[in-house]
Image (spheres, helix red, strand yellow):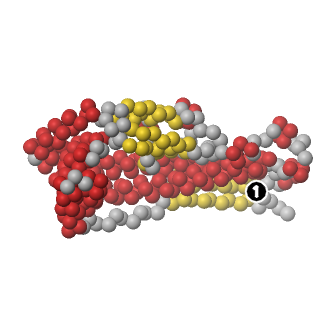
Amino acid sequence: MRQIPIVALFVLSVISARPARAGDVAEAEALFREGRAKMDAGDYAAACPKLAESFEQDPGTGTLLALAMCRERAGQLASAWASYGQVASRSKREGRADREQAAREAMQALEPRLSHLTITVDRTTSALAGLVVKRDGAPVGSGAWGAALPIDPGEHVIEASAPGKQPWSKKLSIGAERDTQNIEVPELVPEPAAASALPTAADASGSAPASKGPPLRTLGLAVGGAGVVGLGLGVGFGLRAQALNAQSNENGHCNAQNQCDAVGGQKRDDAKSAATIATAGFIAGGVLAAAGVTLFVLGTHRRERAATVVEATPVVGQNDVGLLVRGCF
């Protein structure tokens, strides 16, 4: 039978995320009053979440100041310090010099008491495609690696994962004040399935018994599976990036000239970090998927391989990423 060229193009398009729900001013006012009452009663564990939700519904500077004070009294010094900084920036734009000065003085008073955590990443691990480092479930961008960053006291979890590697995590406890700690993400080890599929010298030469099956096909499936995981990771973070970018434009956080307040700027930064991870996931996933297809084809018996020619190439565009597979069967 004459060989027929077949071309297949798979494109993953990021679907626009749904916009976040609009803030409820009445709900925000009710939560603010409940939060202040709880704070006056000394119940900071209940007060701070209510004030935080009130600010999400109606991001007023006064609410943010109350939240900063609540977090300080609850011992969440790093969060309080960051909130005071946002209050100072917003107050300056609003022309409230008295509030700006009070917020900056509160920041200065907290700085000597802050605890810090430095996350470093092993050099080999840092070069892995699709590497994701998280602190308490939130991604930590590469720009923050090696920096001593303020952190609230209590239990924290540091995680790292990459396609084809076993996930790594470690718990640590941060002291109430002036605690400085360092943690290193070690070299990640391969997944057991990928490690067991590595071919031996006898397998590579083709002298292995036929009953064991071509080992390269098993390795191809493992590598291709890792590629699918990378592409899925890219889709997930791509959706998150779009959602965060959309949120930054709501409630006047950012204007048409891309001028943003503290909340909008933070969401824009988070969106950029998510977009970077999404791009890395797409590229790594495409490369691994292409490698998996190649290994699978190379692992076929010689007679089967003679009749099959496959070429796989990652495709990266401005708005979509995919895998181009071309071959003759």
Taking 304 as reference, is 77 above or below it?
above
Image quadrant occupied by the C terminus: bottom right
Give the x, y percent position of residue 191.
66, 45
Name the residue: 65% across, 53% down: 225
Task: Mark yes or no: residue 201 visible.
Answer: yes
- Position of residue 196 in the picture relative to residue 39 (left or right): right
Q: Position of residue 121 (x, y in %)?
A: 50, 34
Residue 182's quadrant in the figure?
top left
**Percent from the top left, x then y, of residue 30?**
20, 66
Amino acid type at mark 1 = Cys
The residue at which mark 1 appears reads as 328
Residue 67 seen anywhere in this rendered image of the structure:
no
SS for dot 1 = strand
Side (left or right) of 211 relative to 129: right
Q: Is residue 253 left or right of residue 297?
A: left
In-front residue for pair 227/192: 192
Mark 1 Cα within 10 Å, few/some/many (few <14, many 20+)?
A: few
> Which residue is pictured at 71% across the width and 52% down the height?
221
Q: At x 10% / y 47%, what residue is drawn?
A: 96
- Foreground: 249 or 175? 175
Residue 107, position as x, y percentages in the image: 21, 38
The residue sitting at 77% across, 47% down in the picture is: 216
For the image, the number of numbered tags is: 1
In screen coordinates, is 225 left or right of 240? right
- Quarter containing the N terminus: bottom right
